[in-house]
Amino acid sequence: MTSLENPSLQQLVKDARELFVKEFNAQPTVAAFAPGRVNLIGEHTDYNDGFVLPMALPLVTVVVGRPVDGNIASVTTTDPTVDEPRIAQFSVTQENLKPELPKWANYIKGVVALYPTQVQGFEAAYTSSVPVGGGLSSSAAMEVATYTFLEALTNKPNSSSTEKALICQKAEHEFAGMPCGIMDQFISVMGKEGHALLIDCMDNTSKDIPLNDPNLVILITNSNVKHELSGSEYPTRKKQCADAAKLLKKKSLRFATLDDIQTLENLKADPDIIKRARHVISEIKRTQDAAQVLRCKDYRKFGKLMIESHNSLRDDYEVSTPALDKLVEIACEIPGVYGSRMTGGGFGGCTVTLVTKDDVCKVIENVNSKYDKKASFYICVPSNGARWIGCF
Ligand code: GLA
């Protein structure tokens, strides 16, 4: 449980309650939230058994609701960008649940279907400060918020946080058709205030890395170019990585080294496969190095690794966009910037920039004057993972 110390969380709960009362003509009895995330480094490594270094955001998805008799769930959202209708009803009987329209409700259905026990009917209202399509894991926030809400509804906190993250990941695979890795759901469940998490995606263990220097700012810049990952690019990249590992006779690219790039070249592997492997192998190493220098508060070295990561995602993994490249370039013009890179799956979305507190305004001004679209900015501190907010 947590108190409502975060004012934006308080506002979100208020908005969700208002929507709930309007739609269901009753008061909600329970509430939960789950955060979005920003990944500091370690991109497209999670489905390669590698390392990632994300932190949970103060941007969250809130759900309020109450149990009702019977087996019907009625859910609604304040998000004006979702597909219509914005109120959806479905039977919670687990074996009958399948994805259908509206698409936004499938994240909720998936979690209800895969929840460890059959739940009873409920009414729920969602609201969120995680931008949709911004690459900050709005979908994982919705899944994990739903799971946490179901825990509150059944009054049974799940015994294992890892199992919770894995179930939410499965919901994304089966009900949203996006074959994601474990990073987003894991950090949304396990985020820790004042810390980034170094997650080893081979065994789903994690180490807390303190990140609470008052002179340092983590600035997220949204390119406002929508990011859509369930297209073919993500599964294609995933398959290319699996193909590279297979050619190298390794279980995954986690077990490969940069020397193996030569082996792939000798085997006359497809040039795209070689590039993808080079990104993943180098990014896994960069992420471990980055965690180490972050522990020592060596932000210069950390920033250099961020730039290398961006360049590798741009040139070898080919998931950046001209808008993201431009945002990184503009940010790096300011001397107080340690590093900047695209974050998340790519093909649009956000950049993350590490900058001194004194210079963050200069970065924002520079982007506003040189970026040819309208960017949005979020200054974020590492925040806690999902929680019940309490009962009303
Ligand atoms: C998306 C996926 C994650 C991860 C990132 C890239 O956010 O959901 O599992 O693969 O892309 O690092």
Image (cartoon, rainbow, N blue to C red):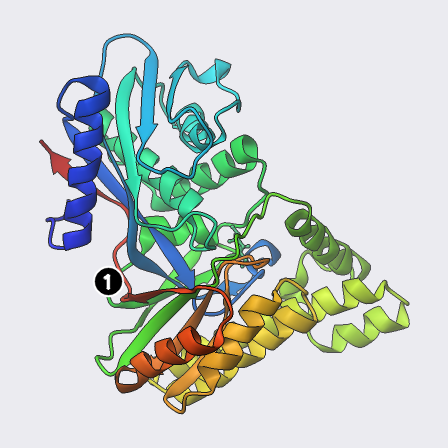
Q: Residue at x 47, y 55 (%)?
A: 135
Q: Residue at x 41, y 13 (%)?
A: 93
95 or 327, which lies in front? 327
Q: Where is 10 relative to 237, above or below?
A: above
Secondary structure of the residue carrying numbered label 1 = loop
Q: Is residue 174 left or right of residue 332?
A: right
Residue 361 percent location from the top left of the image: 30, 79
The quarter in which the N terminus is drawn is top left
Residue 90 percent location from the top left of the image: 41, 16
301 or 363, which lies in front? 363
Tell me which corner region of the image, top left, top right, bottom left or bottom right, holds residue 300.
Answer: bottom left
Residue 62 percent location from the top left of the image: 26, 40
Residue at the disc numbered 1: 193
Q: Where is 283 relative to 216, above or below?
A: above
Residue 166 showing in the rendered view: yes
* Ligand 1 within 8 Å of the CB at mark 1: no
Residue 65 showing in the rendered view: no
Q: Residue at x 20, y 38 (%)?
A: 15
